[in-house]
Amino acid sequence: MTEARSLGRPRSEASRQAILTAALELVAKTGYARLTIEGIAARARVGKQTIYRWWPSKADLLLEAGAAKADFSVPVSDDHGSYGADLRAFLQASYLLSNRPEIANLLRSLMAEAQINPAFGVRFRELFLERRREALFVITDRARQRGDLPGRPDPGVVADIVFGTIWYRVLATRQPFDTRLADDLVALLTHDQVLEEMVYPEMLNHR
Amino acid sequence: MTEARSLGRPRSEASRQAILTAALELVAKTGYARLTIEGIAARARVGKQTIYRWWPSKADLLLEAGAAKADFSVPVSDDHGSYGADLRAFLQASYLLSNRPEIANLLRSLMAEAQINPAFGVRFRELFLERRREALFVITDRARQRGDLPGRPDPGVVADIVFGTIWYRVLATRQPFDTRLADDLVALLTHDQVLEEMVYPEMLNHR
Amino acid sequence: MTEARSLGRPRSEASRQAILTAALELVAKTGYARLTIEGIAARARVGKQTIYRWWPSKADLLLEAGAAKADFSVPVSDDHGSYGADLRAFLQASYLLSNRPEIANLLRSLMAEAQINPAFGVRFRELFLERRREALFVITDRARQRGDLPGRPDPGVVADIVFGTIWYRVLATRQPFDTRLADDLVALLTHDQVLEEMVYPEMLNHR
Amino acid sequence: MTEARSLGRPRSEASRQAILTAALELVAKTGYARLTIEGIAARARVGKQTIYRWWPSKADLLLEAGAAKADFSVPVSDDHGSYGADLRAFLQASYLLSNRPEIANLLRSLMAEAQINPAFGVRFRELFLERRREALFVITDRARQRGDLPGRPDPGVVADIVFGTIWYRVLATRQPFDTRLADDLVALLTHDQVLEEMVYPEMLNHR
DNA sequence: ATTTAAGCGAGACGGTACGTCTCGTCTTGAA
DNA sequence: TTCAAGACGAGACGTACCGTCTCGCTTAAAT
């Protein structure tokens, strides 16, 4: 397969990196609401047009910056021996990620922008949300092959419940996603009874 | 204690109604991203100051407009006889609400703004999200008194799972919240096994 | 005749003056080519929109500034007794004006912009050039009544010759318009012979 | 001294022609205000650098294009027998030129740019305006040798009056330079009385 | 009845950022 | 060394809204 020919001056990788870095620094410093393209360009010592040429919105820029600099990925290739163990490992990786404040803030901003800007919403779902779902389906597929996947709920609903609960903590309650919640989710989704006498006094989540 | 009586011209209820109506109409027509205070004022034939005098942001205005004109409330006072039945009724009321497009769009916008504007975020949690949690806790409290509340997960986690799943469908997958998902959630949270042979052909949610 | 109703906040005279002053100062300092609306707004400590709201272009702004602050007007009401004397007085007032460097520069810029921006060209002709022609026609009309207006050239052509010569010095040769040139023009247009032996040694205009 | 012979690829005459042509076409189509180097380069299918390498500004480019494609020159070598006849021939050639709309527009733009861009102003005077003055001085010199040059005004002032009147029509009144004006100028400058009963009904130039 | 004190529609104000345009320069590979 | 192509840093453009302000005019309660 031949490469599409370059013509004219090639894109500056140095500028690209400077822009991604400046965007993350600025959003951490000022918050998404006060993040401006002009501010990013000034901090990166770059013309505004260089940003507009390559990214359709500041949210797309942040999404790429997050992927490049913060590593949103969650590993799913390891086989921990059972559906429950795989699920627990996935949840643990997720909450390690979502409990890092700069990551959580970034995710909040991106999810918010996805609601407000429909075109970005499409890209955010395709490039981020659906890839995370696919990662979870690696686990459910492996469980199905192993024979320990419960019949209900089906994997799509499992994904809705798992990601829904994580995102709700990030977006709504702003409580950290903790071990206890992971245990509860694993127990529910594997239909194991959680022993009643297990007590997690560290966080009595409401009442 | 008597009310501190007003001095000067009283607030115009006609203008208040015109503003709330104009805000809902405009957000439905143009989307939240293009909604402006100036646009609302022009459509309501009202001075901008009249909006700024009474609402701290356009999101607060929309929140009040939604509450006043669209009725976000979910009834929980009825006792359906069991935790599962109460839960199912609650979920059903929720998805009837979240499946109305103009309501779903409004909720999306408000949740988005709550991420971006911290001050509004506080008000949105207090005035909307926590009231919905309280409604659910009416059901879990009744179940506890009745004796059919499972020991795990505790009510706070139940709320995270229930609302998380609903919101995730609204914000992320944009699939309607349907009967099947309600059944799965009720089954999981009441620890009932869903019969494997139950088939819901209407929506095979992924794979 | 009733006055057009004021509605809303009235225009700020302080801002208007600050803008006119800033425009003249900046054009003197940087030249017309580097004059920007942003620069004027910044120097006048005014929002850009306040300029765009009231003037269609920076040339219109300069035209008003020149009229308000520099006084382009030439007096023609005095009767000096003869066509030649009136003409000489008019020319003298004109060259006193056009020999002031900041005025000459302003006129150069406005005439240039009038060539490049057709809409401004129309306004410049109506508001400046034609008013100057009218001033000259006051003199020719008076001469006609007095009976000492030569039959040829007619007043329109006289205006073309008089203003053409002045403008050509301003735009093309950039030589000062001097007494000698005024004498020559008066002599030609009144059909008087200039005495050959009159010598103006101060400026032997070419060769 | 031998010519420093070029090294490397020689200048492309095809590109030069394409640029000159594109410039004239574009300025005719869009007007000088909207003429851009980028636009010329695109229309000529030429790199921008090729323009910047050879011309210091778009006005210089237009000046060369006008000289090359439109022929600004006015013939003065013919001897028509008298100062008046030579002058009339010169004026006729001038008004034939200045009444061609695309030439007049070009001259307007160049004179405008000469006011705004001082460096181009110098070149425009040297390369265009002063050459035209020299052409007129050929006529006055011939008249002096012939003995029919009036003592006043001197040739420099004659040039100011002649070119001033022509340019004023082009820049200010935008009326065509016509036979009648030429007659008036010749009569004035040769001190002939124009017969009062001569009537030029085609253009009663004001009052 | 007059006065006082808001609230009202209207719209100008100082600001800020937008996304676009064009400038003049730089960096490729090909001619 | 020039050429076409096109990315680059720079910075002004004209627009859109922000949230504030200043008008004259209601509209009531307090005088």
Image: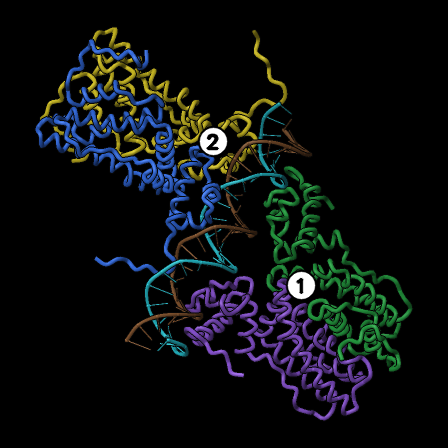
Chain colours: A green, B purple, C blue, D yellow, E brown, F cyan
Give residue D21's quadrant in the image: top left
Characterize the local packing of mark 2: few (<14), some (14-19) or many (20 or more) Cα atoms within 10 angstroms.
Answer: many
> Is residue D204 at least partly visible in the picture?
no
Rendered view: D6 above or below A151: above
Label 1: state its secondary structure.
helix
Residue that appears at 68% across and 75% down: B166
Rendered view: B6 above or below D41: below
Give residue C109's quadrant in the image: top left
Residue that appears at 88% across and 70% down: A85
Residue that appears at 79% across and 91% down: B147
Q: Is residue A88 left or right of residue C36?
A: right
- Identify which residue, B73 or E23, lies in the foreground: B73
Chain ID, mark 1: A
Q: Give the CA distance from mark 1 to mark 2.
A: 49 Å
Look at mark 1 in the image and give the residue it sits on.
A111
Residue D13 appears at what percent x and percent y? 52, 25
Amino acid type of the residue that numbered disc 2 sits on in the rendered structure: Lys
Label 2: state its secondary structure.
helix
Amino acid type of the residue that numbered disc 1 sits on in the rendered structure: Met
Residue C45 appears at what percent x and percent y? 47, 46
Residue B148 appears at what percent x and percent y? 79, 89
Q: Is residue D1 left or right of residue C183?
A: right
Q: Which mark is residue D58?
A: 2
Numbered-mark total: 2
> Is residue D99 at least partly visible in the picture?
yes
